[in-house]
Amino acid sequence: MSGLALSDFRRLVVKVGSSLLVDDHGRLNRDWLAGLCDDIANLNRQDHEILVVSSGAIAIGSSILGINKRRARLEDLQAAAAAGQVQLVHAYQEALGRHDITAAQVLLTLDDTENRRRFLNARGTLGKLLERSVVPIINENDTVATEEIRYGDNDRLAARIAQLVMADALILLSDVDGFYTADPAADENAQHIPAVGKISAEMMAMAGATRSDVGTGGMVTKLQAARIATHAGCATVIASGAIQRPLRALGAGARCTVFAAAGTPAAARKQWLAGVHDVKGELRLDDGAVNALSGGSSLLPVGVIAVAGKFRRGDVVRLIDNNGAEIGRGLAEYSDDEALQLVGCQSDEIEATLGYRGRTVMVHVNELVLFDHD
Ligand code: GLU
């Protein structure tokens, strides 16, 4: 049986559920993790970029602190996460270190992906880590995330990360090997669905609320994650991690469900930008900058000749050419005040001009759309 062609995907987010990493007594399954990291190392060697979203902090920490997860209050779980996260990330560092791969811990709260200013910060940091072939090990910052500001489950966090970094595949590893027409543990007639084009309301209803014991995500959260990611141009795979070397197994034909991406990540991003109504300001560009943008470059401060409107970092601004025509839109990396100070500024003058080290670009190429000319 031919497997999933992982080679088709350059940037992959792999989500690891708690139940794979941690046993019922809160002990880390180090052999399994070593196998996963062998797979990651293989993919890394073939020039794939891998980001891991790993659960497990609360499960490990609860056992360290003697907390009964089922009866625990939120602050107990937050304390458990603080104790467990250190061990979790240390285990990844060790397992990846055997392959001379550097691991980096990234802890996020909901605001970091939902607020555009913070979204740019997170994207910048993750991008730099990937440039250096570091594997980010991402989790929710459970120690500070209270109920109202939580993702709550790492399936959704992983989908947001996939969207943030414009990944082309999201692989959700857990104790289920795909989507079924009913809960396979409860219904022997449940049918496995290998490929899904569009997630329907009927499928959401079929997913019910199946839950595994150790983690928090059920099939519903996986479908919600698949919905977010596929709309962002990222194929999503639900696969079993309950085997050694789960990514290699996928490539060799292990059963899974693949949700097709709607277009590419870049197209999805551009479509979103083009449709934003809430445009806050304008940047007028010189001819050199217009040419550079058409050639696929980011907008640098040196190419900006005027700034209008009130905007903050992360707001959408119009890009105007020298004749006053709107040529596109993008997310501003600077506020209007800062942009004004930076008009015509060379990149190496930014720090002296602002008095602090800023970003080199005014609008990043991934965060801009150019309109077609007639
Ligand atoms: N962030 C939680 C942890 O690391 C897991 C959330 C989930 O299982 O989805 O323990």
Image (spheres, rainbow, N blue to C red):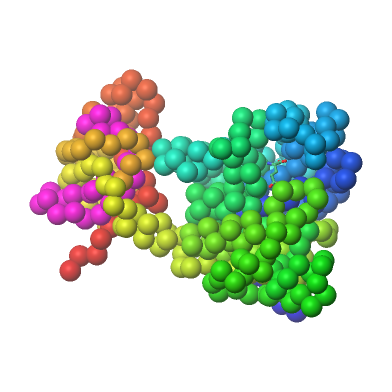
**Quadrant of the image containing the N terminus:** bottom right
Horizontal relation, residue 334 to residue 142: left or right: left
Q: Give the range drawn in magenta.
A: 317-340
Residue 335 falls within the magenta-colored stretch = yes
The spot of residue 295 in percent (x, y) is 30, 57
Image mark count: 0
The answer to whether residue 80 is left or right of residue 136 is: right
Above or below, 252 against 11 in this view is below
Give residue 374's quadrant in the image: bottom left
User: In the depicted view, which residue is nearer to us: 293 or 166?
Assistant: 166
Horizontal relation, residue 332 to residue 230: left or right: left
Q: Where is residue 74 in the image (x, y as percent from the top left)?
A: 70, 33
Ligand 1 falls in quadrant: top right
Residue in the image at 66% along x and 30% along y:
143
Q: For this rendering, which residue is in front, 170 or 193?
A: 193
Place residue 354 in its image quadrant. top left
Which residue is at 64% across, 52% downward?
155
Give percent across and percent down for residue 287: 17, 50
Does residue 17 lie above or below 373 as drawn?
above
